[in-house]
Amino acid sequence: MKITVLGAGVVGTAAAYYLASEGHDVTVIERHAAPARGTSQSNAGLVSPGDATAWASPAALKTFLRALYNHDLGIKVRLRFDPYFLAWSLRFLRQCTKERLRANSRVKLRLALYSRDCINAISADTGIGYDERKKGILYFFRSQHSLDTGTDNYRYLAEHGLPIEIVGRDRLIELEPGLAGVKEKIAGGVYSPIDQTGDSRQFVEKLAAYAAEKLGVKFLYGTTVEGLDIEGDRVRAVMTSAGPIAGDAVVISMGPESGLLGRRYGIDLPVYPVKGYTATIPLEDESKGPTMGGADEDQLIAYSRLGNRLRLASTAEFTGFDRTHKPSDFAAMFRTGKDLFPGAFDEKKAELWAGLRPMMPNSVPVIGQARYENLYLDTGHGHVGWTMACGSGKFLADLVAGRKPEIDPQGLVYGG
């Protein structure tokens, strides 16, 4: 088939790779001048099945409500007139039960584990390197109380296939010598040995180049999607700034903009942008930096080691499609980074970035046919899009081919 993929982030590019590998004629439309210049440009760098717990939970409900008036939290909600945010919030709140938390987390874990294998298979098959490290990830807590209460979700993931080790501070420092300077400030944590790290932008750039050269995928950069030409129950063409592009099927992988396009054509796609901030900093002294990825669960700061660089990431801010940032947005991030890794970096050399995660109310992406016979979705991956993108791309290729996917499709296939 002739298939048009909308979006050249990690999700769209992975989908294009798998579809082209099946022999389809694939064209990717991307509004930026290069791949991975939107959500996939910068993130925590974590490929993390260990972070498969859904956001919506009884605890998140309390935090979400506190964030309406306390803007010092890791979650920030800016009150503004936005009917779509109100509708999204009501759907999010309906997911904040223990039963829904467990169900959504199981689906995320299933896809995340599968996707990690897919990322590694792509890397092996294509020779793509992306500053990857396969040493695991540490999720640690600063107080005994937060350790005791915070490990429940990880234990639940372990019951459903995630290998973990609950570690005290001595074992934690044995695993990550880079945290030796703050040993007494950490009570313990969770070590997920199969988790890994890597630079998503490097991965996407190299995968796009490989797909273009080896598989014949056409990437139309600097091209804006203006709409869909629909007749009956089929999409005839994608209307773009470069003119109409006809084909046999269309895949929407436009990150946070996916919901905007879908709603224009009657598709119930509650994707909402959630803003996150990252700083990428050269290590002044590599011996003082981390050797693997990690997350300070009390400070809500994640980090990864990308070659000779340190990536810090934090914040979930509900502020619409605003992508701006200012120095003060990174102050807490740098305080925590310097506390954890003193002398490792100079924050004045940091590359600062803010981007939007495409969040579904239940934290689970949507994949598959939507309303029209030849229109597919592969979007809504939220804060773990880098983790789940390759698995969802392969899953989508199976659906397009009419094959039974390699993993259980329950909870993943679009049903709106």
Image (tube, grey):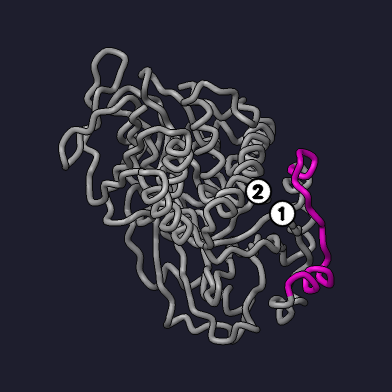
Looking at the image, residue 4 lies above or below residue 274 = above
Looking at the image, residue 154 lies above or below residue 247 = below
Q: Where is residue 143 in the image (x, y as percent from the top left)?
A: 75, 65
Quote the CA–CA distance across marks 1 and 2. Answer: 8 Å
Residue under the point 62% across and 78% down: 289
Residue receiving disc 2: 49
Instruction: Give the residue type that dot 2 points to.
Output: Pro
Q: Where is residue 179 in the image (x, y as percent from the top left)?
A: 70, 76
Name the one closer to the observer, 53 or 406.
406
Left or right: 12 with respect to 229?
A: right
Q: Position of residue 314 (x, y in %)?
A: 52, 61
Q: Which of marks 1 and 2 is nearer the N terminus?
A: 2
Residue under the point 48% across and 76% down: 281
Instruction: Give the residue type that dot 1 points to.
Output: Ile
Residue placed furthest toward the top = 232
Question: In which quadrant of the rendered image does the C terminus lie?
Answer: top left
Residue under the point 32% across and 53% down: 322
Q: How crowded is mark 2: few (under 14 residues within 10 Å), some or many (20 or more)?
A: many
Name the one closer to the observer, 120 or 104.
120
Left or right: 48 with respect to 173?
A: left
Residue 194's mark? 1
Q: What stretch is highlighted in magenta?
A: 157-176
Mark 1: which secondary structure? loop
Question: In which quadrant of the rendered image does the N terminus lie?
Answer: top left
Contact, CB < 8 Å: mark 1 with mark 2? yes
Name the one closer to the observer, 286 or 98.
286
Residue under the point 80% across and 73% down: 174
Camera sees residue 12: yes
Eye-nearest disc, 1 or 2: 1
